Amino acid sequence: QVHLVESGGGLVQAGGSLRLNCAASGSGTPITIMGWYRQAPGKLRDLVATITGGGVINYADSVKGRFTISRDNAKNTMMDLQMNSLKPEDTAVYYCNAVIFVGLGRYDYWGQGIQVTVSS
């Protein structure tokens, strides 16, 4: 069982910056992929960015050039999301995700979510 805790959300004006952090614990198996997803009111949960243990990164088109995902290579249990040039449409609950593969099985774990609000 993997426990994920997010921190760093809050309220910011458009054009501002926030940094989200996700701390993972409890995994006896290396976490293969960590990522951030977000869910705005009335919408589905969408990918923001993911990063593998090998450093392969994927961003949603809507955040490319503005957001940067990073991971603690030493422990592979800490992940950050630097969000710059924030827009009101970035307002959502942001969720940390961790993916572990055991044999042929994929196991996804989620944090409790953290609110990010960008005012215009």
Image (spheres, rainbow, N blue to C red):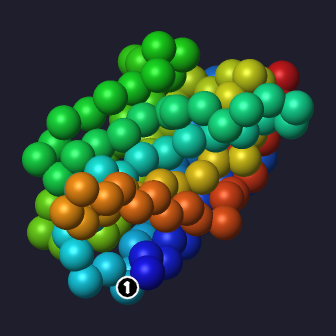
Q: Which residue is mark 1?
A: 26
In the rendered view, would you say 104 is above or below 48? Answer: below
**How many numbered discs, if any?**
1
State the residue in front, 56 or 106: 106
Left/right placement of residue 42 relative to residue 57 reads right
Q: Secondary structure at mark 1?
A: loop
Name of the residue lying farthest toward the right: 42
Left/right placement of residue 63 relative to residue 26 reads right
Left/right placement of residue 28 relative to residue 64 reads left
State the residue in front, 101 or 16: 101
Inspect this view and state whether residue 34 appears. yes
Q: Position of residue 91 (x, y in %)?
A: 75, 34
Q: Quadrant of the C terminus?
A: top right
Q: Could you tell me which residue is drawn at 60 percent across and 52 percent down?
A: 95
Q: Quadrant of residue 74?
A: bottom left
Q: Amino acid at mark 1?
A: Gly
Q: Position of residue 4 (x, y in %)?
A: 50, 71
Q: Quadrant of the N terminus?
A: bottom left
Q: Could you tell me which residue is drawn at 24 percent across and 66 percent down?
A: 102
State the residue in front, 2 or 17: 2
Q: Position of residue 28 (x, y in %)?
A: 25, 83
Q: Quadrant of residue 14?
A: top right
Q: Could you tell me which residue is drawn at 67 percent across and 37 percent down?
A: 45
Q: Position of residue 69 (x, y in %)?
A: 36, 41
